[in-house]
Amino acid sequence: MSHAYLDTVKSFLLDFQDRLCDALAEEDGDAEFKEDAWTRATGGGGRTRVLENGALFEKGGVNFSHVYGEELPASATAARPELAGRSFHATGVSWVLHPHNPFVPTTHGNIRFFIAEKEGEDPVWWFGGGIDLTPYYPVYDDVIHWHKTCKAACDPFGLDVYPRYKAWCDEYFYLKHRDETRGVGGLFFDDLNEWDFDTCFAFQKSVGNHFAEAFLPIASARKNTPYGPRERAFQAYRRGRYVEFNLVYDRGTLFGLQSGGRTESILMSMPPVAEWRYQWTPEEASIEETLYHDYLHARDWLGEADTE
């Protein structure tokens, strides 16, 4: 039973990777993804696809992986110690896009599936994933569009789903040592098996399939906005926060490294250029200060929009 589930999910994920790469390359218009297939010595492998120095994307990656082993890594059992010692299969697609233009947000997403097995016991399966947006020079209407699309992905599964997973995203993509969110959020879910398999799988597919609808109109609208050295410098500074989160808090990064995954694929999410400045603060009343004041904390974006 467990491997029938696995094959069904893998088939979707491989097709999803193809479709997403095609859509992103078309929007970029000047570069194609290069594929790097790899194998993992202790079980599994994947196909990493990276686009660099395109017209839109300075660096972008869309990775598929399926790895398996005799024991779940600590990052996967920290919240579920009852699964420690089980063998596992983990498969998913993750993507990160770092545009050239500072007015186009960085964005990230992943959809994943796990099976944990132990002889004499039923397999335990669950889904996880989400999508989030990290603008540097945010546009309010873009953020509303993003969250409306996230909500549309969730609504067929219950009107409580978007508020729950939006709140989880705000909590997860929060840099405690900076007291700020990484961006303007989106959706985050993990350990999803509260519905039957078909419903959980349908929800994962909905989140993945809504990503292009959420992000590409924003990228298309902002990619030709004029910018100069000041905006690029601020983008590089804020990208430093992205690095901090991925190396300190991100569960996917920790799982990949602890499970002996392919380092180049795991760290594909890092931006090509980032900066750290000592005790830097934005100028008062500047557009950069607006990001800090209005966007880098949890907000009820759609609730606020409804009252306007």
Image: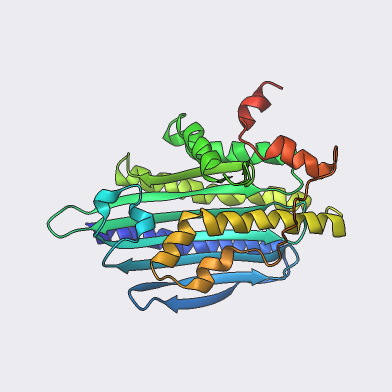
In the image, farthest residue toward the top: 307
Q: Can residue 275 be seen in this view?
A: yes
Name the residue rendered at 67%, 20% in the picture: 307
Residue 235 shown left or right of residue 88 in the figure: right
- Scheme of colours in the image: rainbow
> Exactly how many numbered labels are in the figure?
0
Which residue is depicted at the point 36% across and 46% down? 191
Q: Which part of the image, by quadrant, shows the N terminus?
A: bottom left
* Residue 4 image position (x, y, % from top left): 27, 59
Place residue 200 in its image quadrant. top left
Q: Looking at the picture, does residue 133 appear above or below residue 260?
A: above
Q: Which of 249/90 is in front? A: 249
Taking depth in this image into account, of 197 and 288 the one nearest to the observer is 288
Left or right? Give the position of 23 relative to 87.
right
Q: In this view, does 233 lie to the left or right of 249?
A: right
Across and down, in percent, residue 202 comes to 40, 46
Q: Quadrant of the C terminus?
A: top right
Residue in front for this viewpoint, 231 or 196: 231
Whether residue 40 is situated above or below residue 290 in the rendered picture? below
Residue 227 is at least partly visible in this image: no
**What x and y, as percent, mark residue 268?**
57, 67
Residue furthest out toward the left: 120
Q: x, y percentage for residue 187?
A: 52, 42
